[in-house]
Structure formats: structure tokens, C-alpha cells
Amino acid sequence: MQPKVEMLTPPQLPDAPVIACYRCEVQDFALEDVVLANADEVSSFVTDKRRMEHLSGRWLLQYSLIQWGIESIEEIEVRRNELRAPSLEFIHGMWRNESLPSISIGHGNGWAYVALIESNWTIGIDAEPSDRGIADNALDLMASGDELQQIRENPEMAIRSWTAKESVQKAMRMGMKLNPREIEIPIGKEICDISIEKSILQLRNWMHNEVHISLAWLRGNGQIRSEEDELLDATREAMSSGQEWQIGCNSTRNNS
């Protein structure tokens, strides 16, 4: 049986690009029911928990894409960059060049989360129960200076800072390569902009059914370009320039 899907609504998004966020409970999907799952990747998981989270996240992703208006799910695959940040691409050989949304997938406390944003942006989503504690020795790994002091003085805000930093790492498509101590989150603010490595990110934090959710996004390319993408772009450029162009073979048209 398919899980119930909840649509998530971040606070105040009047000037934001098109964004959609969903969550569903993690359950044990069959591999054949999840078009966007990769059998080799699924077989690599050591625990049932990790396998179920992965399959639930990929099932929720395909549900989200259908809501977005994409019907040809079987023509799409999820690829990862060198830092394992996911993106959507058409399967090699499809020769499709329509824009696909950028994506973020997360898991927490028995739930799968997916966020979509229009192309030319990147996005990150993370969520944790509001009553989850963070050990004091872990605080030194996630914050420093004045921010660390503020978190220690307001321990109830630690989990929100944690999810916010995770969402920023995902939006930057860098994961833990971006040190969380280098991401300074204003304590107690639901809506803010932050600057990292000359990039401006928009950040939203909110509560949903006793869960802290953080969403971050910025301008950028959330796709991994393939050789087919480069060839399609080169072909379009040649056609628009009025120059003669060829792909793969010589051809002659006889108009007599």
C-alpha cells in the first residue's frame, strides 16, 4: 500500500522560484515499484533501515515529479556528482533536452523528504524532531565563536541550527566537504539570507507536526552535464549561427 504523502509549505515564499516539498513515512517498497531506484545501489545497503529509507525517498521523488508535471518518469534517472549530490537527467540515448527541476532528498525519524526547485537553482532540505537533543561535544563540531555560545545559551535551538546547516550543505551540493562550522545560522530566525563562498542562499525554517524543517536554495546548476548535453548545445549553436553543421556522418540533400 502506498504511503500518505504530505505537502509541506515553507513560510513566506512570494519572490522565490517555483518550489515544491513533500514528505511520506518510510516503508518497505519493492524494488520493482520504484522506477527511480538503482538495483546496484540498493543491493549495496547493509541494513534494512537504510534500504527502506532509500526506496521510500526515491518513490517520493517520482511522486513529486508527477505532481510537478513530468509524466515520463521511466526516461529519467538520478545521478550523483563526485560529492554524491543527486540530480535528475534523461537516460543516455533519449536525446531529450527539456529542463528538469533540481532536487534534494532527506530522511529523518521514519520519514522521507523531497524538495524540488525549478532549473538553474539548487535546493536542500533537512528535518529532525524538535525534541531531538544534540550532545554537547557535537556542538563544537557544528559551530564556533559567537554562534556556538548562542547555541549553548539556547540549547532548544540546537536542532534547528543543525537542520539549517544540513540544508545549506545540500543546496551548495557539497555535503560535509562544506564544514558546518563555516555556516553561521542566525539563531531564532525563520527567514533569512546567508552568504557562503560568495553565494547568497535563502533559508527558511519552520515547524510541521513537531518536526523542525529547514529549506535552503540558491542560484546554480543542479544537473550533471553529459556528452549528449554538450552535443545538443553545440548543434543548437551551429544551427542558430547559420553555419553548415553535421552530426556523426555526411549527408547530401537532392532537391531536384
Image (cartoon, rainbow, N blue to C red):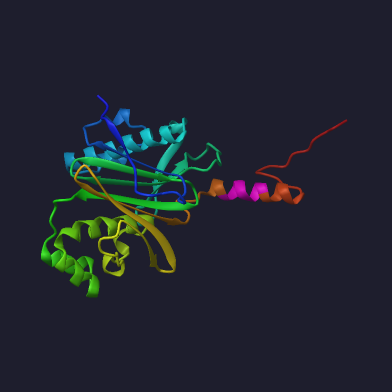
Q: Which residues are magenta?
A: 230-236
Q: Residue furthest right?
A: 256
Assess whether residue 232 is covered by the magenta stretch.
Answer: yes
In the rendered view, tell whether residue 156 sits above or below residue 229. below
Q: Residue drawn at (55%, 39%), measured in percent from left and top?
A: 96
Assess whether residue 106 is covered by the magenta stretch.
Answer: no
Q: Residue drawn at (35%, 49%), measured in percent from left and top?
A: 11
Q: Quadrant of the C terminus?
A: top right
Residue 15 point in image, percent of width and height: 47, 51
Horizontally, residue 81 falls left or right of residue 138, namely: right
Q: Residue drawn at (19%, 40%), measured in percent from left and top?
A: 110
Horizontally, residue 9 falls left or right of residue 139, namely: right
Q: Which residue is more in the foreground, 50 or 212?
A: 212
Q: Residue furthest bottom?
A: 145
Q: Residue drawn at (55%, 46%), measured in percent from left and top?
A: 228
Residue 142 point in image, percent of width and height: 22, 65
| Residue 65 placement: quadrant | top left
| Residue 143 placement: quadrant | bottom left
